[in-house]
């Protein structure tokens, strides 16, 4: 592993995205270089310019054009907040945007990937979502969902769950996975 580790933070269009700095700042403090990647819709959920100032890197939301600089290679990936849509697409190998393309490839490469969903309890009762979580876990993705992780809120009450969103737990989980993968 290189001296400077690179953490990709994939942000989806969900309420807590406006507070992505709560994951980025601690990661930077812990010595990570952070590359934020946003789904196209997520760009309206947080301030990309503020994140770029914090990380010193442009927020990516599309494939680079020929001649544009590449992002540094990831050592690990955190998806937070992960939307219902992204969890289901990722589990089914769909890569219809840059963020999903990066995630699908990262899993295939065996990178440590942590998914921290932000969904309400009605979504978690859906069988497609349950199958997606199981499928991702079977591929070695750490999905932080359930007691001791992200506990889904009742429908219509997501705004009250923003401050309880366990950003730091996602960073701790990805750091736990690194020694297992570095061998």
Image (spheres, helix red, strand yellow):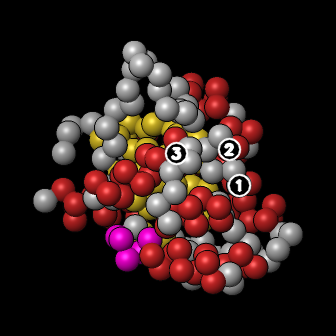
Residue at the (79%, 65%) spot, across then down:
158
Q: Which residue is mark 3?
A: 99
The image shows residue 152 at horizontal and vertical percentages of 68, 75
Marks 3 and 2: in contact by CB < 8 Å?
yes
Residue at the (74%, 54%) spot, across then down:
15
Furthest toward the top, the residue is 67
Marks 2 and 1: in contact by CB < 8 Å?
yes
Residue at the (39%, 44%) spot, across then down:
7
Rendered-image quadrant of the N terminus: top left
Q: Which residue is mark 2?
A: 42
For the image shown, how many numbered marks are present on the structure?
3
- Is 134 magenta? The answer is no
Q: Distance of mark 3 from mark 1, alpha carbons?
A: 15 Å
The image shows residue 166 at horizontal and vertical percentages of 58, 63
Segment colored magenta: 136-140
The image shows residue 2 at horizontal and vertical percentages of 20, 39
Q: Earlier in the sequence, mark 3 or mark 1?
A: 1
Residue at the (42%, 54%) spot, across then down:
104
Helix, strand or loop for disc 2:
helix
Tell whether 87 sits left or right of 69. Answer: right
Helix, strand or loop for disc 3:
helix
Q: Which residue is mark 1?
A: 14
Instruction: Examine the residues drawn in magenta and state their main secondary structure.
Output: helix
Camera sees residue 136? yes
């Amino acid at each position: 592993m290189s001296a400077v580790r690179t953490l990709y933070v994939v942000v989806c269009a969900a309420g807590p995205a406006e507070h992505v700095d709560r994951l980025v700042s601690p990661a930077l403090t812990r010595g990570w270089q952070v590359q934020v990647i946003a789904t196209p819709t997520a760009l309206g959920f947080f301030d990309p310019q503020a994140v770029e100032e914090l990380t010193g890197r442009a927020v990516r939301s599309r494939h680079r054009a020929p001649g544009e600089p590449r992002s540094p290679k990831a050592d690990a990936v955190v998806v937070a907040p992960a939307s219902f849509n992204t969890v289901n697409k990722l589990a089914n190998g769909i890569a219809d945007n840059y963020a999903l393309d990066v995630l699908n490839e990262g899993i295939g490469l065996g990178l440590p990937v942590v998914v921290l969903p932000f969904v309400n309890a009605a979504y978690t009762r859906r069988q497609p979502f349950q199958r997606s979580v199981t499928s991702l876990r079977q591929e070695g993705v750490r999905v932080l969902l359930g007691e001791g992780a992200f506990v889904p809120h009742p429908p219509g009450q997501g705004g009250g769950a923003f401050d309880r969103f366990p950003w730091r737990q996602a960073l701790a989980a990805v750091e736990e996975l690194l020694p297992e993968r570095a061998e």
